[in-house]
Image (spheres, grey):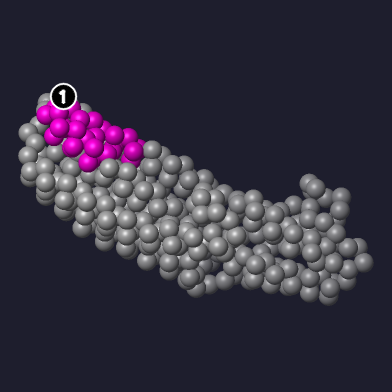
């Protein structure tokens, strides 16, 4: 049996707020870095501007992902549009790979080969410091949401970040961490170039920023691809679901349990259940309704539950 749940979840509202904060921060920082890069001639600053610009476009795509995934189910898409979020998030990661990483590495290599004239170091350092503070604000928003999820699941934020189906939250946290590291790389490259008088260091800083973006993009592409093709819920969630099923007195064993991430914060559960032979039709209906209630109470992310009564001789154990 199944009863779909409609409406926007609190978690999705949180993710939307996290994405909007990150987008506003990145847009402001991209403009400031571009001005500083043009004034100073620094390859690292120009690369950091491209980094923030790519992150801004990424936030727009993530915003689209959230809005698209919230569309209600219809006859053509009876399970809803939740997984469309992963498609848009995948496009966002690919954009980071091509526009952010590609530009930064290419620009850095050109600087190493052709050189550059550096000036106005103070402006660059000021912009980097302000950007670091603003990126910290954006990261703090993402970490607050991550800690709330960790408290709900009674686990560590790191494990939540690894296993969450909320790819928007994962993208914002990864990109904000990368942004902070990128700012440190830009400052190091610029500082070494100023101290040594060799622009090689600034070019290397730009290349390092590109490699950093490459790593983040690949991680996000891998995560979204797995979710897009139907990733199961985390093992801890599946264990909890199985425990709730076996807790019913009418259930003899769980023959097969399948979970699928339908979208950010949305899980489908399908189980083949071996009920006691003496259980009547009425008791099976009551047991099915009770287990669905228990599952939705313990795991609010569960949106649909399908139970299939089967005999003990059918299917895997």
Q: Is residue 218 above or below residue 6?
A: above
Q: Is residue 271 left or right of residue 80?
A: right
Within the image, what quadrant is residue 113 found in? top left
Residue 209 covered by magenta stretch: yes
Residue pushed farthest right?
278
Nearer to me, 15 or 158: 158
Considering depth in this image, is 130 or 213 the residue closer to the camera?
A: 130
Residue 59 place in picture, x, y as percent: 32, 56
Q: Position of residue 147 (x, y in %)?
A: 49, 60
Residue 58, horizontal then vertical, whole percent: 32, 52
Q: On the image, numbered disc 1 is attached to which residue?
A: 113
Q: Main secondary structure of the magenta part?
A: helix
Indicate the quadrant where residue 299 lies.
bottom right
Q: Which residues are magenta?
A: 185-214
Compared across the picture, whether 153 is left or right of 206 comes to right
> Residue at point 47% right, 59% down?
146
């Amino acid at each position: 049996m199944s009863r779909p749940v409609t409406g926007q979840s609190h978690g999705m509202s949180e993710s939307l707020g996290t994405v909007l904060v990150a987008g506003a921060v990145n847009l402001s920082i991209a403009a400031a870095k571009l001005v500083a890069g043009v004034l100073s001639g620094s390859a690292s600053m120009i690369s950091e501007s491209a980094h923030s610009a790519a992150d801004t476009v990424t936030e727009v795509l993530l915003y689209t992902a959230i809005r698209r995934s919230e569309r209600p189910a219809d006859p053509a898409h009876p399970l809803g549009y939740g997984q469309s979020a992963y498609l848009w998030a995948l496009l966002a990661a690919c954009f980071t790979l091509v526009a952010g990483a590609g530009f930064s590495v290419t620009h850095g290599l050109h600087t190493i080969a052709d050189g550059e004239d550096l000036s106005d170091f103070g402006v660059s350092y000021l912009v980097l410091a302000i950007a670091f503070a603003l990126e910290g604000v954006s990261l703090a928003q993402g970490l607050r949401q991550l800690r709330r999820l960790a408290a709900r699941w009674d686990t560590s934020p790191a494990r939540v970040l690894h296993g969450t189906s909320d790819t928007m939250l994962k993208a914002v946290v990864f990109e904000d961490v990368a942004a902070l590291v990128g700012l440190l790389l830009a400052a190091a490259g610029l500082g070494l170039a100023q101290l040594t008088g060799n622009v090689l260091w600034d070019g290397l800083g730009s290349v390092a920023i590109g490699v950093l973006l490459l790593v983040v993009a690949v991680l996000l592409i891998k995560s979204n691809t797995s979710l897009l093709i139907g990733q199961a819920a985390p093992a801890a969630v599946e264990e909890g679901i199985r425990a709730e099923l076996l807790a019913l007195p009418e259930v003899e064993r769980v023959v097969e349990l399948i979970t699928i991430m339908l979208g950010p914060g949305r899980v489908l559960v399908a189980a083949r259940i071996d009920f006691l032979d003496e259980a009547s039709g009425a008791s099976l209906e009551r047991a099915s309704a009770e287990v669905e209630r228990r599952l939705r109470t313990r795991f609010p992310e569960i949106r649909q539950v399908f139970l299939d009564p089967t005999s003990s001789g059918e299917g895997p154990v």
